[in-house]
Structure formats: structure tokens, C-alpha cells
Image (cartoon, grey):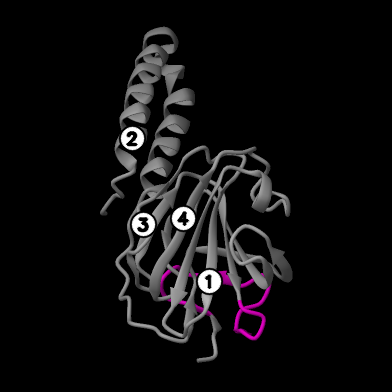
Amino acid sequence: MKLHKESKGTILVATIAVAVLGFLAVYFLEIWSLIIIIPLLILYGLVFWFFRVPNRDIVDHKENVIAPVDGKVVMIKEVFEDEFLKEKAIQVSIFMSPLNVHICRYPVSGKVIYKKYHPGKYLVAWHEKSSTENERTTVAVESLTNHKVVFRQIAGYVARRIVFYCNEGDTSKAGHEFGFIKFGSRMDVFLPLDTEITCKIGDKTKGGIDVIAKMKE
């Protein structure tokens, strides 16, 4: 299983913690140490599972808006996007549980025209206000269909570290990685009002593969 590059620090800390706690459990509890060791090993395995990098065949897209993350669609609504677009847009929000792959991918192909990191709170990721009050990043892309699309990584109650690798002027390719969020979190995508939304609330998405919307040329 291939692991994401963001896993190195976390796995090192987890390995040390499991080794130390396991040693102490065996030293003080002897045979009863299994009560501690077995849950530790399960948690240790979940850390590796969280940072897995699945093999996915990413194809080229123009009009299609691709799911930027693995997760569950929790919101589709018309909102006013006041950071970059300064106008009404359709917001599609996808929540990621700690068991989902947490690689963040470009939802559309085009050119990166804006990026910004915002420190903030750590409300639970499915909270509506997390989009504007939590630690988050905002990226805007001028799509191949000549639309401006904004998408936002949002830290959740557990997630405390967001990384994004894109810069203004970069070429974005729908389905390809641009960042990572550690543990529970959310992605919001803001689309033009005339976009055809092809997903619905409750849908499970596979990042880089599933089409969640189509934009008019």
C-alpha cells in the first residue's frame, strides 16, 4: 500500500507512542497487557489506512466538475460567495470522515488565479459556519469553459493541518491532487448558478472519478 507524503511525521509519532505504551503495558500488566496492546495496534493500523493513496485512472475533463475528495455530499444550496466571486453561486459541500481518503483534488481543469490560507476555529466540519469560520484555504480556478470556480478546504474538529501545493498561475487538471487535509474535514465547491448539478445530498463520492456537476460552455 502506497502512503501519502504527509504521513511521515504522523506515523513517526504514532510508532513511538505505540512502542512506548506497549512496553509500559507489558512491563506493568504482563499478560493483561493485551487489553492495551490490541486497541493500540488497531489505532496504529487506522493511521496507515488514513494516509493510503489509492490507484485511480484520472481522465481529462472540460465541462465536467469532478468530486474533489472521497466523502459524502452534505450540502447543495445557493449562497453568496463573498471572498472571491462576490456573487451568488451554488455550493456543493462534501464531508470526509477519518476513514476516507483525504487527498484533495482539483474539481475542474483550467488555471489557478487565486489562493489564500485562513486561520480560524475548529467547529465540526459539517457545521454550516465552518465554511467561513474554521481554518481553511480558498482556491479559485479559471476553468476551460471560462467560468470562475472557487473551492475551499475546511479543517474540522479533529483536523488541525491543511496543506495545499498549488500557486497562482499553475495549470489545474480535474481529478489531480492539489492538497491534503489531516483527519475529519470538508471540501466546498462554488459553481456558477447555471451549472447542472448531477449529485444529490447523501451521495458517496470518489475523488477524481465521480462527476458532481457539468458546466455550460
Query: Is label 2 in a helix, a strand or a loop?
Result: helix
Residue bearing the label numbered 2: 11
Q: Which residue, given by chain and number where applicable, does mark 4 sit on? A: 115
Span shown in magenta: 192-212
Q: How far apart are marks 2 and 1 (CA)?
A: 35 Å
Q: Looking at the image, is 182 positioned above or below residue 95? A: above
Query: Dot 3, how many residues are within 10 Å of its Cα: few (below 14), some (14-19), or many (20+)?
Result: some
Residue 176 lies, in percent from the top left, at 35, 67
At x 36%, y 56%, the residue is: 167
Q: In this view, does 134 lie above or below 99?
A: above
Circle 2 crowding by C-alpha within 10 Å: few under 14, some 14–19, many from 20? some
> For this rendering, which residue is in front, 36 or 82?
82
Residue 149's label in the rendered image is 1
x and y, in percent, of residue 160 in the image: 52, 37
Query: Which badge, 1 or 3, is on the more N-terminal residue?
Result: 1
Q: Which of marks 2 and 4 is in front?
A: 4
Q: In which quarter of the image is residue 133?
A: top right
Instruction: Kindly identify which residue carries mark 3.
Output: 166
Q: Point out the tag, 4 or 3, that comes first from the N-terminus.
A: 4
Query: Mark 3: which secondary structure?
Result: loop
**SS at mark 1 in the image:** strand
Separation (CA) of disc 1 from disc 4:
12 Å
The three-letter code of the residue at mark 2 reads Ile
Amino acid at pointer 4: Lys
Camera-side mark, 4 or 3 = 4
Q: Is the C-beta separation of discs 4 and 3 under 8 Å?
A: yes
